[in-house]
């Protein structure tokens, strides 16, 4: 994970994500001590179009955070103007 990555966070990353979210990473907080395999992240929660809706600090299980592939030449929005939804699922309420 590196600054600028878009993550898909589900219950695999933390029990707090009953409803999965998209998250644009600003930085991984390496100065904070955590349990093995867990980390603090700073960044922005994104809506379905890729726009930032909230600044967040999150405590997540690193192995459960899924980094989305970059959309080369299409920007964040891709052709449909929406973030890609893993496994063909639609975002709740979108």
Image (cartoon, rainbow, N blue to C red):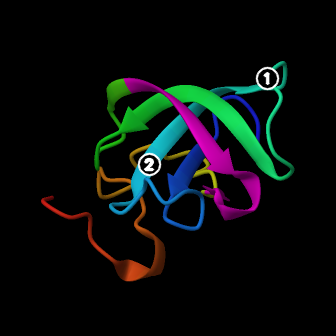
Query: Is residue 58 found inside the magenta-colored segment of the image?
Result: yes
Eye-nearest disc, 2 or 1:
1
**Residue located 39% across and 46% down the image:** 77
Q: Quadrant of the N terminus?
A: top right
**Residue located 44% across and 48% down the image:** 22
**Residue located 53% across and 35% down the image:** 24
Residue 56 location in percent, x, y? 46, 27
Compared to 75, does 18 lie above or below? below
Q: Which residue is mark 2?
A: 22
Residue 26 location in percent, x, y? 62, 24
In this picture, residue 42 sits left or right of residue 78:
right
Of residues 38 and 86, the one drawn nearer to the viewer in this rendering? 38
Mark 1 lies on a secondary structure that is loop
Q: Label 1 crowding class (10 Å Cα cut-off): few <14, some 14-19, many 20+?
A: few
Chain part drawn in magenta: 55-67
Compared to 42, does 21 lie above or below? below
Compared to 17, does 59 lie above or below? above
Of residues 71 and 29, the one drawn nearer to the viewer in this rendering? 29
In this picture, residue 22 sits left or right of residue 43:
left
Query: Is residue 82 found inside the magenta-colored segment of the image?
Result: no
**Residue located 27% across and 71% down the image:** 90
Q: CA distance from mark 2 to mark 1?
A: 23 Å
Query: Residue 32: which disc?
Result: 1
């Amino acid at each position: 994970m590196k600054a600028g990555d878009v993550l898909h966070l589900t219950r695999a990353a933390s029990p707090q994500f009953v409803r999965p979210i998209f998250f644009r990473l600003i930085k991984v907080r390496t100065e904070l001590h955590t349990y093995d395999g867990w980390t603090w992240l700073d960044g922005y929660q994104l809506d379905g179009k890729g726009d930032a809706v909230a600044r967040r600090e999150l405590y997540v299980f690193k192995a459960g955070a899924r980094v989305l592939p970059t959309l080369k030449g299409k920007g964040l929005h891709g052709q449909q103007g929406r973030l890609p939804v893993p496994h063909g699922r639609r975002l709740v309420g979108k």
